[in-house]
Amino acid sequence: MASTLWTYLPSTPGGPLDVDRKFCDRLARETDERSLVERLVVPIRSGKAWSVRAGQLCRIIVIEGPQVADFNCWILPYRLTEFDVHDVLNIFQVTGLTNDKYFMKASPAKTGDFFEFFAEIDLLCAISTCPGGDLSVPLWGPDAGDPLSVCRPLGVEVYEPAAELLRGWTSPSPSDYRGNHGMARPETA
């Protein structure tokens, strides 16, 4: 069963979460109209970084069975430190809260499953293959064990779509973000 992320995003026409569904569906559907730019494998309990240019597609792929990925991306150049790492997007992970208690379940991902996105701006992307593997082995508590046997590599592919698929699309202008997450600074006396 295939689904798209924008199926789940509530949005208002013209709002910040509004997407051009026809454009996104065309990019997802026309996979023969793209060329592979880069392919890499991220080994178990490791990480890699790569660039994705505006207008390209990036795909993170389950290549040998379920494995959780910790994904992050950043607007270039690369002058980053450990302070530039923010909360990750956990790809292929099932997690949540029940009665205010955090839980994780084993990843349901299967070989061939993928997470794909379209880069509207130049990005530096990075993933690490979660040291907990597919999270089927408890990481804490009385049944905790070493999950090495459920750790697997992940694949990454970057694609250039055919120019005609991008006709009419332009990269958005830089945000006017000025810090403080949109909150006004308090006035001081």
Image (tube, rainbow, N blue to C red):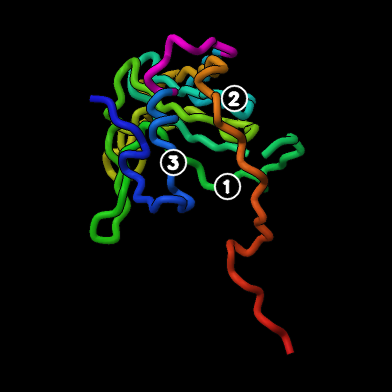
| Image: 170 above or below 164 | below
List x then y, in percent, for residue 4. Answer: 34, 32
The residue that mark 1 highlights is: 86
Q: Which residue is mark 2?
A: 48
Relative placement, left or right, of 81 versus 102 is: right
Q: Give coordinates of residue 106: x percent, y percent.
A: 28, 33
First reached walking from the N terminus: tag 1 or tag 2: 2
Give the magenta range: 27-38
At a point 61% along the width and 41% down the height, the residue shown is 172
How far apart marks 1 and 2 lie (CA) works out to: 16 Å
Residue at numbered disc 3: 19
Classed neighbour count for the residue bearing mark 3: other residues with Cα under 10 Å, few (<14), some (14–19), many (≥20) = some
Q: Is residue 93 left or right of residue 119?
A: left
Foreground residue, 7 or 127? 7
Q: How far, Cα to Cα, is label 3 from label 1?
A: 24 Å
Query: Does residue 115 show up?
Result: yes
Which marked residue is nearer to the observer: mark 3 or mark 1? 3
The crowding category of the residue bearing disc 2, from other C-alpha atoms within 10 Å (few below 14, some 14 to 19, many at least 20), is some
The amino acid marked with disc number 1 is His
